[in-house]
Image (cartoon, rainbow, N blue to C red):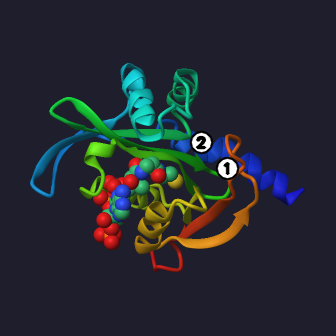
Amino acid sequence: MFEKFKYWYHCTVNARRQPFLDYSRRLIMIGGHHYVVRQAAEKDINRLVEVEKQIYGTAPWSYAAFQLELSRHHDRLYIVVEHKEELVGFIGMAVDWYHLDLHITNIGISPDWQKGGIGTYLIKTAIAYARHLQLHSLSLEVRVHNLVARHLYERLGFRENQIKQRYYLDNHEDAVDMQANLLSRGE
Ligand SMILES: CC(C)(COP(=O)(O)OP(=O)(O)OC[C@H]1O[C@@H](n2cnc3c(N)ncnc32)[C@H](O)[C@@H]1OP(=O)(O)O)[C@@H](O)C(=O)NCCC(=O)NCCS
């Protein structure tokens, strides 16, 4: 019963306190390049799908999948990074108000722009946003074989929790479930 009450409280009271997730546009410089960082909007979806195609060869997330995510203003936030109006990277976040967790749903940097610090910047932005919302943790899943991403997350404070077997639908690859605990970092 108490669990049900907690769930109701987080879904109603917290959701009312934070009805819309928003992120203000900013200009940043990483490694000598200037970028615009801003909240994603519906007009960006074709370019988000295009970045996924550049990375994976196909687009794991369809136009409709991004559209659904971007429509959920109360618990989703997508941020894009642009260089001279070219969309070069993005990150997606989903707030779990019940567990006070910020889940990273997706992150992608266009191949030409990888290794330039944008991924690090976006994960740090997610951590800062989780703190801003007074959440307790961040979480994500990553393919077992994606050592670049696993290393990046570990360097930024994520720890491996468990393996989710055959998690990915395309090739049945296992996922590593990772979490960064903000409370244990004194935050
Ligand atoms: C994983 C990813 C988001 C990292 O973004 P990024 O902008 O390239 O990351 P950064 O430039 O901040 O680099 C982070 C680290 O990864 C290393 N790195 C990045 N790309 C690399 C590559 N292709 N090969 C080897 N090392 C790489 C960097 O050298 C850096 O290492 P360091 O921490 O020892 O300095 C990006 O490579 C990407 O989009 N990959 C394809 C999609 C993907 O895997 N998404 C994650 C799904 S969970």
Q: What amino acid is labelled 1 in the image?
A: His
Q: Which residue is pictured at 72% across the width and 49% down the height?
A: 172
Q: Alpha-carbon distance for marks 1 and 2?
A: 7 Å
Q: Which mark is residue 10?
A: 1
Q: What amino acid is labelled 2 in the image?
A: Ala
Q: Residues within 10 Å of mark 2 (few under 14, many from 20)?
A: some
- Horizontally, is 178 left or right of 73 in the view? right
Q: Residues within 10 Å of mark 1 (few under 14, many from 20)?
A: some
Ligand 1 quadrant assignment? bottom left
Q: Please state the horizontal and vertical placement of residue 137, each as a whole percent of the image.
A: 55, 65
Q: Which residue is pictured at 58% across the width and 27% down the height?
A: 65
**Disc 1 secondary structure class:** helix
Q: Please state the horizontal and vertical placement of residue 52, each as a whole percent of the image.
A: 45, 35
Q: Please state the horizontal and vertical placement of residue 17, each as a whole percent of the image.
A: 53, 44
Q: Is residue 162 visible?
A: yes
Q: Quadrant of the N terminus?
A: bottom right
Q: Which residue is pictured at 56% across the width and 35% down the height?
A: 60
- Horizontally, is 169 left or right of 26 in the view? right
Q: Confirm if mark 1 falls within 8 A of ligand 1.
A: no
Q: Which residue is pictured at 71% across the width and 42% down the height?
A: 169
Q: Nearer the viewer, residue 87 or 157?
A: 87
Q: Nearer the viewer, residue 96 or 145?
A: 145
Question: Label 2, on which residue?
Answer: 15
